[in-house]
Amino acid sequence: VLLMDSGASIRQNLGSQKMSAALGFVIGTGYGVPLLFRRAAVLKRCERTLSARKDRGAAHLKAQRSLSDAPAVTVAEKTGSSRNVLDTLRERGLVEQMSGDAEGTQLRALLEKPTAVYVGFDPTADSLHLGNLLAIVVLRWFQLHGHKTIALVGGATGKVGDPSGKSTERPQLDDSTIEKNMAGVSKNISTVLSRNPPQEFADCDLKEPEFVNNGTWMGPMGFLDFLRDIGKHARVNTMLNKESVKNRLGADGDGMSFTEFTYQLLQAYDFVHLRRTQGVRIQLGGSDQWGNITAGIELARKLGVTNDRADVEKEDDTALYGLTFPLLTKADGKKFGKSESGAIWLAPEKLSPYGFYQNVMRTADADVINLLKRVTFEPLERIEQLEQEMESSPNAAQRALAEALTLLVHGKEGLEKALAATAVAAPGAAGGGTLDAELLDMVAEEMRCVELPRDDLVGCGVIDLMVKAGLQKSKGEARRLLQNGGVYVNNTRVEDVSQRLEEDELLGGRLVLVAAGKKNKAIVRAK
């Protein structure tokens, strides 16, 4: 029994009177001689066992150690910037609510050293849209200031559906659709977070973002285990008071299923799990996520996991924090991110760089400065200058916003294509610019398109083509326009009234751009 005690206790007690008396008793009963001869060997094995356990424990704890618990380096030392990310977010209107004291003193102190933060994205579609971009931008600001950034893509919560901001229940998605959507959403996030940083942060050693899927920890958990270990800490009256629940259960609401009702508890457990495994201290989200975020903070407190790891020194502040940013809305209160023709998608497969650029260019004067501050990394001094010049330089702020966002989402090549396509489609651009099929495909999203049989196109007279494309009412009008120098085919002015369309003028073997003057244009497709 004595030898089953820990090696540390044996070493400590061998020289004591208590241990000597015990050994004397053992020897007196006839078992002492073998015991004394084996004493050195036993102690040696104890030492080896303790050493091995210590090494394994140290390796395990080192693997779990997070930046938020590393006391040796500050954000200023890591990035070369003395600014606190909280100041940057406040300057740009990106702070709606935050937990802790009202002034943010506690959160600011935590953010003086590298801290792990996360944002959750549910894979409800195979691409995020412009409204979702704000969450990525806020995560990017934390990355630029030297913090550990984690994007949670909800393979588990995506099966349930977040009721926040929804008047009806989301449609249920099958597993294969969720997997496809997760890949698309992860690509959207990774693309933005891997762009070249703004000039101010060009020399910073930025940490790559991490991606996690809550399906990996929610999936193996049984329903009864979840109810017993997690559900018992949730109070129904508190859950009913969440804004997302009250709106649905009110007189104008559509009601709520039990599945949706439990969503806030699933998101709360995500926060707890990421604290345990990644050292996360802060959850970020839109203002509609405040209730879900605070539910996670409360659950962590009840489970006692705010400082459950032995590999770090005791922290003065062990609380978890939440920070929300305002939703991206227009001056009229409508959400920004959708147009009359549908969502402004981030994936180029769903919306071309040109279509994206054009949608952003339509931003109203009342919204453009606010968007420049919130969803771009343009210096505030330049944004202030653009605001002052709005009357003297119409659309200059919109152009700056469209270029900055297109560069962020689609990269340099995407922006170049968007600008080239814009030049093709712009009034007065009929006489210049190099065309190809890809540009015309982009422009087709915004321009009149006509389909004609290939046999009717190749060899067709340009005058006849103008009528068939709907650009002129009659051949006589088309002839007069051509004689006055107002007819263009693929940006080249037509001089000869008898000119016919050649096979090699079909770009990509299928498209031709026809223009009647500076503004009236059409793309003709061969079918």
Image (cartoon, rainbow, N blue to C red):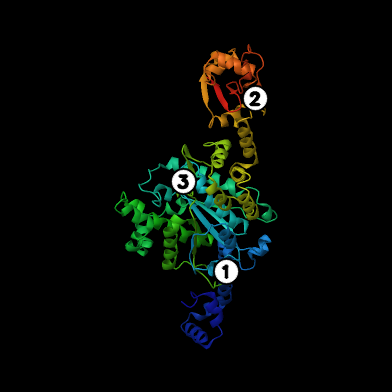
Give the percent coordinates (x, y) of residue 99.
48, 65
* Disc number lying in front (1 or 3): 1
Q: Disc 1 versus disc 3: distance between alpha carbons?
A: 34 Å
The disc labelled 1 sits on which kind of residue?
Ala
Give the percent coordinates (x, y) of residue 3.
50, 76
Count of number-bearing discs: 3
Q: Find out whether the residues at labels 1 and 3 contact each other: C-beta distance under 8 Å.
A: no
Secondary structure type for disc 3:
loop
Q: Residue furthest right?
A: 203
Q: Disc 3 versus disc 2: distance between alpha carbons?
A: 43 Å
Q: Disc 1 versus disc 2: distance between alpha carbons?
A: 60 Å
Q: Residue furthest bottom?
A: 17
Secondary structure type for disc 1:
helix
> Foreground: 460 or 454?
460
Secondary structure type for disc 2:
loop
Residue at x 59% of width, y 31% of height: 425
* Disc number lying in front (3 or 2): 2
Residue at x 52% of width, y 22% of height: 450
- Comes first in the chain, label 3 or label 2: 3
Q: Which residue is mark 3?
A: 123
Q: Residue furthest left?
A: 251
The disc labelled 2 sits on which kind of residue?
Asn
- Comes first in the chain, label 1 or label 3: 1
Q: Which mark is residue 125?
A: none
Q: Which residue is mark 2?
A: 491
Q: Which residue is mark 1?
A: 109
> Foreground: 107 or 525?
525
Location of residue 302 (image quadrant): bottom left
Give the percent coordinates (x, y) of residue 348.
55, 38
Q: Is residue 364 above or below residue 118?
A: above
Q: Residues within 10 Å of mark 3 (few under 14, many from 20)?
A: many
